[in-house]
Image: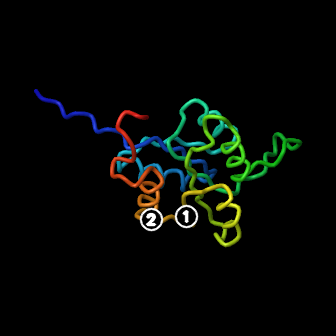
Amino acid sequence: MTTQPAVPVRGKILVIDDNPIIQRAVYFALRDHGYKVLMAGEIPDAFKIIRAEHPDLILVDLSFPMDTVNIAAPMQDGYSVMDWIRSTPGFEKTPVMIISGTDPAKYKERADAFGIKACLHKPLDKESLLAAVQQALGGNPAGGQPGQS
């Protein structure tokens, strides 16, 4: 009996979005094209995953609901995630893409300042998502060297 060789992982991608429908859609679109997909529905979870997994690419929503449990905590949104990534040694060069329902014109200047690789508007188009991810990971079909994950 012969076995098929394992398909190399194209890249490890973290999706940070509080909407479970968006999470599932992005998860299946990326997983079905060979990416390892990690999910975070809350920002504190995202920071833990980033530290533990060192993703090759981060997709982040801009808007998150207020933390009603920890009301005195500072407001956290996609911008706070990008601030943290850009100021944390070892992660400052990690490519980031925005996935948001917000009008892109409202955040284009800030996105450019953060060096964002792409800004995708919800609802997401699968082909645009895949093309942007491939480009953010270096533009080659393998999305980087197999085994980097």
Image quadrant for the N terminus? top left
Q: Which residue matches tag 1?
A: 120
Residue 15 pos. (x, y %):
55, 48
Which quarter of the image is occupied by the C terminus?
Answer: top left
Q: Residue furthest top?
A: 1
Q: Secondary structure at mark 2?
A: helix
Asked if the residue under mark 1 is in contact with the one under mark 2, i.e. CB atoms within 8 Å, the reply is: yes
Residue type for callout 1: Leu
Question: Element under label 1?
Answer: strand
Q: Amino acid at mark 2?
A: Ser
Q: Foreground residue, 97 or 73?
A: 97
What's the CA distance linking mark 2 and mark 1?
8 Å
| Label 2 crowd (10 A; few <14 / some 14-19 / many >=20) | few
Tell me which numbered mark, 2 or 1, is placed earlier along the sequence. Answer: 1
Q: Position of residue 113 (x, y in %)?
A: 68, 59
Occupied quadrant, residue 74: top right
Residue 5: image x %, image y %?
Answer: 22, 33
Residue on which the image places disc 2? 128
Callout count: 2
Identity of the residue drawn at 68% across and 49% down:
82
Q: Is residue 144 left or right of residue 105?
A: left
Q: Is residue 17 above or below residue 108?
A: above
Q: Nearer the viewer, residue 74 or 42?
A: 74
